[in-house]
Image: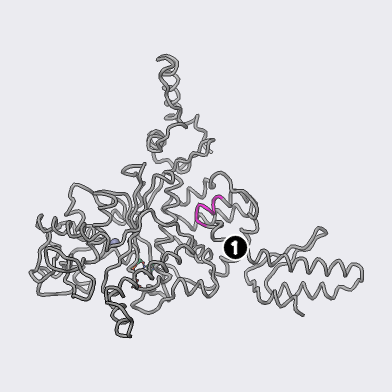
Amino acid sequence: MICKAHEPAVQHYYLLHYLLKYSAGWFLSFPSFEQLAKPALRAAILRHSLGDRPEAHALRSDEGFVMTTIKLHNTRTRGKEVLDPINPDDVRLYLCGPTVYDRAHLGNARPVVVFDVLYRLLREVYGPDHVSYARNFTDVDDKINATAVARKEAGAPGTLEELVQERTEETISWYLADMAELGALEPDHMPRATAYIPQMIAMIEELIAKGHAYPDGAGHVLFSVKSYKNYGALSGRSVDDMIAGARVEVADNKRDPMDFVLWKPSTDELPGWDSPWGRGRPGWHIECSAMSHELFGDSFDIHGGGNDLMFPHHENEIAQSCCAHPEGDFAKIWLHNEMLQVEGKKMSKSLGNFFTVRDLLEQGYPGEVIRFVFLQTHYRKPMDWTDKKAKEAEATLRKWRALTAGIEPAPSAAAAVIAALSDDLNTAGGVAELHKLATTGDAASLLASAQLMGLLTEELGAWAKDEEVDLSIYEKALFDARTVAMESKDFAEVDRLKSAYLEAGVEVRMSKAGVELVPGAGFDPAKLEAALKP
Ligand SMILES: Nc1ncnc2c1ncn2[C@@H]1O[C@H](COP(=O)(O)OP(=O)(O)OP(=O)(O)O)[C@@H](O)[C@H]1O
Ligand SMILES: [Zn+2]
């Protein structure tokens, strides 16, 4: 803990406070440092004296007020940067959400969990009412249309438009349910592309007016990449490299092979909207530019997604937004998570090497375990899902849940955990700190710190509770057997139960006071059940 009295800025503030209060008269009611309602002002005062010193990363007062310097890796500048919000009263982050044509695979969940940790950290530091998080749904797309066409061909009733809507609605509800099971808080805004078509059309018109886009006369509008000199700056590639590396579609209607679609025609049966260029629908990239602008304006703090979106999606978003609104910065920090892999390759629908979040949940992996596995790898490193990791995560969570059962969380998370998360979301470092807290037996702090990372929460606890209840039956069975054995001096049943429990992956702790069973890494509830049915 850093004593606030040692901080020069705070000392100066108090000095000013008392000078005004006692010399200028009582009518001047000057708020105390803690009473300053605006985190922005408190932050500015502290930042002024603390600068970027490491000990300033987690600072708390006796009242539990936390002011932290958060550093994030910015893809745009290729280095870690101090997050200096445009408006600390409203820190804004935007995550590219899913195209809702099918269930989310485990890879799709990675950015959601990463951003959820960031969202929780920002809420902790700036206050829950001072953070706005938007994650969109792309609900107009060729892939969605294809699912509707397939259903129609299979004889489903309804128009194609209705089948498209049916598909997007069901996919969105699956997505929300699956992400909730991973402990992800719902964002403040979940804009659907189809609700922002007028804003997209307006933005395209603006781009045409400013000479950055052109209609082809056949229902398409294209963005002119050559008209934006910074194109490629995010991913650090030249336009020529990009043409060579990507499958750039050469088409007769493009002035340049790199130009990309802002608007395209739609058939009469498929979803479409009237526009100055005829009935059509937006390209994918303009959706995020228009939605983030509508919600957050010309400039906001953080924009993210998987690093597979860096090019072309994010390059294109930047080109569109910066050309339509040159007075703004669009996003200041670009955060990209690395890929979840399967045998060294990106998990993806197109490669077919995927399993869904729902598959895992149905196989009996609790959502909390899946989340914990994610948190053990830094978001900028590739990772694999393995059964071994899941088993270890499950055993750890079970232990921590037992340790914190019935305990009130500490008023705030441990400073070391906040410091780890503030250092470019070092969740693996945060988990290491949780282990330390568990080892020292600081259950209240363990609970508060784990909850900051979205673990050991009430909502995610059902899976562990079931077994807690069950265990008491087995503890009682062994306890009763021992009571009988003490009389009869025949310990055969006690020994049988003990070895059956061990066999089921449960550690047996016996004392005069009673029996305690602690499930270990290889815990098998079915075997445990069988132990009582000899
Ligand atoms: N293997 C992965 N690991 C981590 N993030 C991923 C992975 N695959 C996709 N994502 C991320 O998931 C989010 C949703 O992406 P999107 O809806 O475009 O995926 P998709 O088209 O369904 O998946 P795919 O890339 O498998 O075709 C994006 O932020 C994307 O970067
Ligand atoms: Zn996007």
| Residue 518 appears left or right of 178 | right
Residue 452 forms part of the magenta stretch: yes
Ligand 1 positioned in quadrant: bottom left
Q: Is residue 365 above or below residue 72?
A: below
Q: Residue at (63%, 61%) from the top-left corner? A: 399
Across and down, in percent, residue 314 comes to 26, 61
Q: Residue at (30%, 78%) from the top-left corner? A: 158
Q: Quadrant of residue 457?
A: bottom right
| Residue 294 appears left or right of 60 | left
Q: Residue at (35%, 78%) from the top-left corner? A: 351
Most frequent secondary structure within the magenta stretch:
helix
Out of 33 and 393, give the one closest to the viewer. 33
| Residue 143 appears left or right of 465 | left
Q: Which residue is mark 1?
A: 396
| Residue 396 appears left or right of 508 | left
| Element under disc 1 | helix
Q: Which segment did they paint magenta?
A: 448-454
Location of the N terminus (image quadrant) = top right
Q: Residue furthest front?
A: 158
Residue 509 forms part of the magenta stretch: no
Q: Is residue 198 above or below residue 530?
A: above
Q: Residues within 10 Å of mark 1 (few under 14, many from 20)?
A: some
Q: Amino acid at mark 1?
A: Thr
Out of 18 and 47, give the one closest to the viewer. 18
Disc count in the image?
A: 1
Across and down, in percent, residue 534 comes to 77, 80
Across and down, in percent, residue 108 comes to 39, 68
Across and down, in percent, residue 258 comes to 16, 68
Q: Residue at (15%, 67%) from the top-left corner? A: 259
Label 1 residue near ligand 1, CB within 8 Å: no
